[in-house]
Each structure stands twice: as C-alpha cells, then as structure tokens.
Amino acid sequence: MTTHAFNDTAHWLPLDQLEPGFDANKAATSALLDGTSISITTGDGTVIGHDFAGGTVTWTLTQPDGGLDLGTDPYEAFQVADGLFYVQFHHARTHPEEAVSAFFDLSNGVALCVLSFIGPAGGDGATRVTQQFVPATVNGASDRGPLPVPTEDLVGRRVLWRYSAQHVYEHYYLNDLWYTWHCVTGPEGGQADTDEQTTYRLRPGIYVFAWREKVIPCASVTVADHRDALALRSHGVLFGLNEDETRLSHFTFGAHGSLVGISDPVGALESTARHSEQRRN
C-alpha cells in the first residue's frame, strides 16, 4: 500500500472522494417552507423574494437601480430551532459558480445570506472559493430582532464533530479569522490544517460558521447550535471543485458535536505577565 506524508498536500482527497458517507448524520429536511414566500431586504436596498413550492425555490433579486436577476433551483431546508430555518440551494443552471446558504429567522424578522463563489485559480494565495455575508430584514415581519453580526463567541473552544461513525473532526477556533481542523478518524485521518473562517451570531448560542480551504478548492457554510455543550448539532454544505477541477461538488451534511475544552491564550498571557510583574515587585 502506498502511503504519503500528511504534509504532502498533493495527495489530499478531492471533495468528491470525501463525500461518500459524509452525510450519515444529516438531519431530515423540512417541508415547512413549501407553499410559502419569504421576501428580504439587504442593507443596500436590494429586495430578494423566495417562493417555495414542490422542493424548488423561485428567487427574484431586484436591485435599487432596477437591476433584475431571477431563477428557480432545487432547495433543501432544515429547521434549526423554532422559527429558524436554514435553506441551501445552488444556481446550477444560471450561475453554476455560485451557491446560496440562507438563514431565515422568522420569529425575529431577520436573515443572513451567505454566497459562496468559485473563482479562477490564482497565485496570490487567495482561496479559490470566496464568500460574501449579507444580513437582511424579513419584509412584513411583525417582530424585528437584531441583525446577525460577526462574533468571537466561539474563540478558544475545541469541539469534536461527528459527521458519521467514520468521519470525526476536531475544530479549534483560534480567533476571529482562523480555525484549525484535525481529522481524528476517516478518509483524511491524521490530516490537519488552519484555514480562514467567519462566524456570525444568529441567536444566543446559535452560530453560522463558514470556512474557506486553501489546499482543496472548496468552502463550507454551517449553522451550529452550541446551547448544550454535550449535544451540539450542526447542518451545513460543502461546495467546490472535484478532482479534475472542471466539475462542481455541492452536498449537504450534518454533525453531532460535543465541547471538549475551552482555552484562553490571551487571558493566560495577561495572567502570566501580571504574575511576572508581581514577582519583580
């Protein structure tokens, strides 16, 4: 059997070879949005309408200057909590390089859209898949809560995520820009890396966590419920290029998790400095 050093990234699995079995802990999809319409307005005045019917979403994007875009795509919806839905769809026919992760908090009248884009290969160190985060308000909502905002709430946490009995990963959230992942068991067993991440708070204890990988041309968007440290739950998507980098991969998954530790390196550094100063005095 041929083996390769873990740091030999040329032999890391492409996205399509990681997919089989990765969705074993995926939650059942929800049909509660079917037959409904949700319209949102972004900060620049863009209005996006979503009509859900028969497993498809017909979306219409109207810009303040009158610019119009529209399409119909298959979608999957997951109920994250009461009144809070995660909707995933891919513009496979109209804009194949773009996938949409939409989070609708109907109880609080707010939303967050995460747009993932596959761009050309570049040599400037930028990730191949980039992401845009767009908070919005739900039009016609009777209640209005705070808009989703970036947060450092997860910084210092170490979490074990189980995507299946065979796919287990450890996440360590370093700061507001980076996190480290380590495959405990699975096809990528033993591999680890540190990648860019962005975290938004949807509700207290519920977060959108998204990352962009620099080795494999892919990115992920997840929504994670951290309210019970021993019974964390997440739902998400992986979007990127397959091994030949000409075909797209777009698949949803789920995970059960548990908090295994919390560290505070900045606090520890400050504490050490205080103790050192006290000893000198």
Image (tube, rainbow, N blue to C red):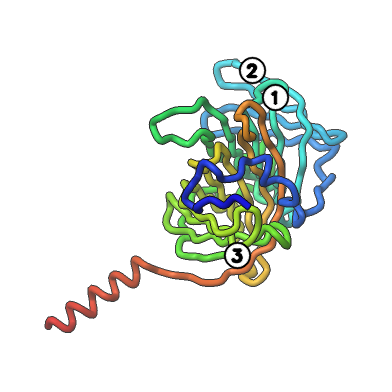
Badge 2 amino acid: Leu
Can you tell which quarter of the image residue 115 is in?
A: top right
How far apart, in angstroms, are the residues tagged by discs 3 and 1?
Answer: 39 Å
Q: Is residue 110 visible?
A: yes
Instruction: Check disc 1: other Cα within 10 Å, few if <14, some if 14-19, many if 20+.
Output: some
Identified at 69% across, 37% down, the residue is 250
How far apart, in angstroms, are the residues tagged by discs 2 and 3?
Answer: 43 Å
> Where 205 falls versus 13 (above or below)?
below
Out of 223 and 134, give the one closest to the viewer.
223
Q: Nearest to the eye among marks 3 and 1: give it.
A: 3
Instruction: Check disc 2: other Cα within 10 Å, few if <14, some if 14-19, many if 20+.
Output: few
- Tell which circle, 2 or 3, labels the residue nearer the N-terminal end: 2
**Residue matched to label 2:** 68
Instruction: Check disc 3: other Cα within 10 Å, few if <14, some if 14-19, many if 20+.
Output: many
Badge 3 amino acid: Leu
194 with respect to 138 (left or right): left
**Residue matched to label 3:** 160
* Residue at the front extreme, as displayed: 1
* Residue at the right extreme, as displayed: 54
SS class, disc 2? strand
Q: Position of residue 245 (x, y in %)?
A: 60, 29
